[in-house]
Image: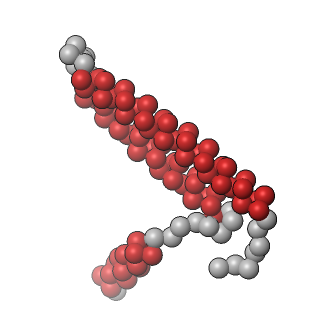
Amino acid sequence: MSENIHTIEELRDVITSIDALSQQGFSQIRSIASLSLQALESPGRSVNTCEDIASALLAIRGISEMIQNDINCESGSVEGAYLDQSMLRRFDARRAAENIFKN
């Protein structure tokens, strides 16, 4: 960990930004999911409903990835980014295994 000291104001700004990002992203995901559920539950749904639902799910995935990256970047600006140590070990193991098979 770096020895940078952040002011309370800097931390507050980052927390506010993270809160805004999460509220915006989760609101979008909730809206898309609600519309998708309504489409599935509608007795007169159109023939393209499955394709529309697939598009909605792709949008949800894209939004969640974007918000995850944005939140990680914001928290990283004050050295607070979460690192999944288990995931990093899996990546390292995969790289090591790939190097074994390359040689």
Q: Residue at x 37, y 26 (%)?
A: 35
Q: x, y percentage for residue 36?
A: 33, 29
In the displayed orientation, state which residue is furthest to the top: 44
Image label count:
0
Front-most of residues 54 and 76: 76
Q: x, y percentage for residue 37?
A: 30, 29
Residue 103 figure quarter:
bottom left
Q: Residue at x 37, y 30 (%)?
A: 34
Front-most of residues 65 and 34: 34
Residue 47 visible (yes or no): yes
Q: Residue at x 62, y 61 (%)?
A: 75
Residue 30 vs residue 5: left or right?
A: left
Residue 49 vs residue 83: left or right?
A: left
Q: x, y percentage for residue 30?
A: 42, 36
Q: Is residue 74 above or below residue 30?
A: below
Where does the N terminus fall, quadrant-wise? bottom right
Front-most of residues 98 and 102: 98
Q: Residue at x 75, y 75 (%)?
A: 4
